[in-house]
Image (cartoon, rainbow, N blue to C red):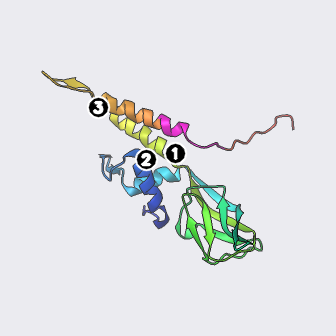
Amino acid sequence: MTVRQGMLDMIGTLRSYTDAGEADYAISGITYWNDEELQRVLDRHRTDLYRESLYPQESYNGGSVEYRHYYANAKNLEGGTVTYLETSAGGTVAATYALDTARGLFTFTADTGGSVFFLYGRAYDLNAAAADVWRMKAAHFAKAVNFSTDNMKVDRGALQENALRMASHYTSIGGAHNVTITRGDE
């Protein structure tokens, strides 16, 4: 698998959340944590976005209202050609905007007049991905053993405990998730 260009910043962020080096260890020929493996973890926590509404934020320029900033409900968007905007009439918006992928903010170079735009792309739950990486690291550390010599004690089990603590931390700070409830009496 090749790492998608629009994922490089997000992979870097995930790497910083998880203290994942390029080659911490290998299992059955798979190196953990190269960019491809981190992208696989992120893809497990991906939401595909189809015609999601953007929300304009008005600003003032010399007493006039302008619409240059549009926010998506989703954060941590994949960059590159995967993410694009569509007009309300269904036409693709030319690249007349800058995208802050982490914040889900589209900043247009000119006033849009409050036009309606829809987002297509992919969003990622970085906290859930970080929790997964920490759980996988804990599983790897499970085989570590404690030992002591004459004047020294090595507590390698603390590595697993710390990894599980970090997994719990990232699970707890994750955002709300949508749940579909279906009535049984319909």
Say which residue label 1 marks: 127
Residue 139, located in which quarter of the rendered image?
A: top left
Q: What is the distance, in whole Å, between disc 2 and disc 3 at their CAs?
A: 23 Å
Kind of residue sitting beneath label 3: Ala
Residue 38 lies, in percent from the top left, at 43, 52
Residue 8 lies, in percent from the top left, at 44, 62
Q: What is the distance, in whole Å, between disc 1 and disc 2 at their CAs?
A: 8 Å
Residue 103 lies, in percent from the top left, at 57, 58
Residue 151, located in which quarter of the rendered image?
A: top left
**Relative height, residue 95 to residue 154 (above, below):** below
Q: What is the quadrant of the C terminus in the image?
A: top right
Q: Residue at x 71, y 76 (%)?
A: 91
Which residue is more in the foreground, 36 or 155?
Answer: 155
**First-in-chain label (3 vs 1):** 1
Q: Nearer the viewer, mark 2 or mark 3?
A: 2
Q: What is the distance, in whole Å, between disc 3 and disc 1 at their CAs?
A: 26 Å
Q: What is the quadrant of the N terminus in the image?
A: bottom left
Residue 31 lies, in percent from the top left, at 33, 51
Magenta segment: 168-177
Q: Marks 3 and 1: CB-CB under 8 Å?
A: no
Q: Marks 1 and 2: CB-CB under 8 Å?
A: yes
Q: Which mark is residue 17?
A: 2
Q: Residue at x 48, y 41 (%)?
A: 131
Q: Nearer the viewer, mark 3 or mark 1?
A: 1
- Helix, strand or loop at disc 2? helix
- Helix, strand or loop at disc 1? helix
Residue density around tag 2, few if under 14, some if 14–19, many if 20 or more, within 10 Å: some
Residue lying farthest to the right in this orientation: 186
Residue 72 magenta: no
**In the figure, is residue 77 to the left or right of 59?**
left
Say which residue label 3 marks: 144
Residue lying farthest to the front in this orientation: 62
